[in-house]
Amino acid sequence: MERIFSGVQPSGNLTLGNYLGAIRNWVKLQDDYESIFCVVDMHAITVWQDPEELRRATREVAAGMLAAGVDPKKNILFNQSNVPAHAELGWVLNCVARLGWLNRMTQFKEKAGKHKENASCGLYVYPNLMAADILIYKATHVPVGDDQKQHLELARDIAQKFNNDFQKEVFPLPEPMIFGSATRVMSLRDGTKKMSKSDPSDYSRIAMTDDADTIAKKVRKAKTDPHPIPESVDGFEDRAEAKNLMNIYAALSDVTLADVCQQYGGQSFADFKKALTDLAVEKLSPISQEMQRYMADPAEVDAILKEGGERANAIAQPVMDEVKDVVGFLRP
Ligand code: AQP
């Protein structure tokens, strides 16, 4: 059976972007693939995280995955720092990846911004650790949002260079899986920026834990434009915010953007926003209620993560041993 690896950082509250771009798709794939889902806490500390908040967010991201329908019996669900082989392989891959490759990564440029001298070294080599996350399980497929496509291509380059350098087919080249009409959910305040957990503005995102009133307020305040809703997908030129809201609607209702244009074309955004609010509340409330139930019982979440970590470790450790042998590390 082919194997999936994917992860989410506990770097804040889970967003609708994380749900539509990643977690929702995992649930659809879990019957057809052997799946390994990870709360990537080591990635989260590439920018400052308050330790208590990091622990809370780690449980919350796990709760979000469980509440969305990830089955911890069928799949492996764990937190990254609990399986040491991620860091071990990450170091080896730091020595395989080339500086020139990392210099092209747009996420580093966006996250480090104008102060890149002050960014952590971890933020810079983050894509190498992400490659290790995938390759340590010899995963064949990686379901991600569109924002992670470049990092996935890098993971393939790293796998290929490792195999070439050592003349051994150790790693399969992982395939990205990017689905649906919401592969990149954009900020509600700026349709050119992606919706992000770490955006300073709370109104830029819908969090998975938002209640109905908060969702309504955020959708009402979401930026649009004075024009009516276009009747076809050709009518979105220079209308990034309009397109984003309609894409979200399409994804939540499992129809195409063209269908939404047909349904709401010519109407005002005020009416459409009401419909979008109702739909978002209908789809997200059951998940957020279930998340709250898990968050009220941290011992249950911890037990799931612990068991998942043991199962992940059982796959990762032999691969790490293989890598050590191939690289020439003595295992006395
Ligand atoms: N806006 C988005 N639209 C579609 N997919 C998205 N993903 C994230 N944002 C969107 C997908 O969610 C998965 C987990 O992402 P991550 O937590 O590893 O990191 P990220 O992509 O950097 O997400 P955030 O929310 O923007 O986190 P911060 O603010 O900490 O950087 C990935 O599959 C990603 O594609």
Image (cartoon, grey):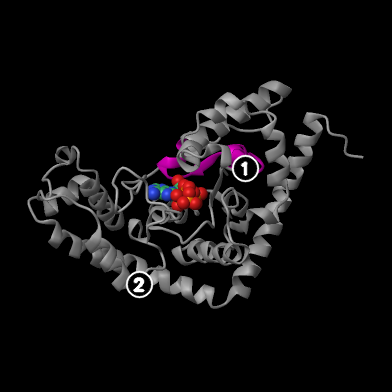
Mark earlier in primary sequence (2, 1): 1
State whether label 1 is within 8 Å of ligand 1.
no
Question: Could you say which is closer to the camera, residue 126 or residue 293?
Answer: 126
Residue ID for mark 1: 122
Q: Kindly identify the residue that appears in the image at 69 percent across and 56 percent down.
A: 82
State whether label 2 is within 8 Å of ligand 1.
no
Residue 32 in view here: no
As drawn, is 231 to the left or to the right of 238?
Answer: left
| Between marks 2 and 1 in the image, the one whose residue lies nearer the viewer | 1
Q: Please tell me in which quadrant of the rendered image residue 308 appears.
A: bottom right
SS at mark 2 in the image: loop
SS at mark 1 in the image: helix
Q: Position of residue 12 (x, y in %)?
A: 49, 59
Q: Position of residue 232 (x, y in %)?
A: 13, 42
As drawn, is 39 to the left or to the right of 67?
Answer: right
Q: Which contiguous range is marked in magenta?
A: 122-149
Single out the residue that lies furthest toward the right.
332
Residue 286 belongs to the span the image colors magenta: no
Q: Kindly identify the residue that appears in the image at 57 percent across and 41 percent down.
A: 118
Q: Position of residue 265 (x, y in %)?
A: 10, 50
Question: Magenta region's main secondary structure?
Answer: helix
Question: Could you say which is closer to the camera, residue 254 or residue 150?
Answer: 150
Q: Please tell me in which quadrant of the rendered image residue 331 appears.
A: top right
As displayed, is residue 70 above or below residue 265? below
Residue ID for mark 2: 211
Q: Amino acid at mark 2?
A: Asp
As drawn, is 156 to the left or to the right of 246?
Answer: right
Q: Kindly identify the residue that appears in the image at 37 percent across and 46 percent down.
A: 194
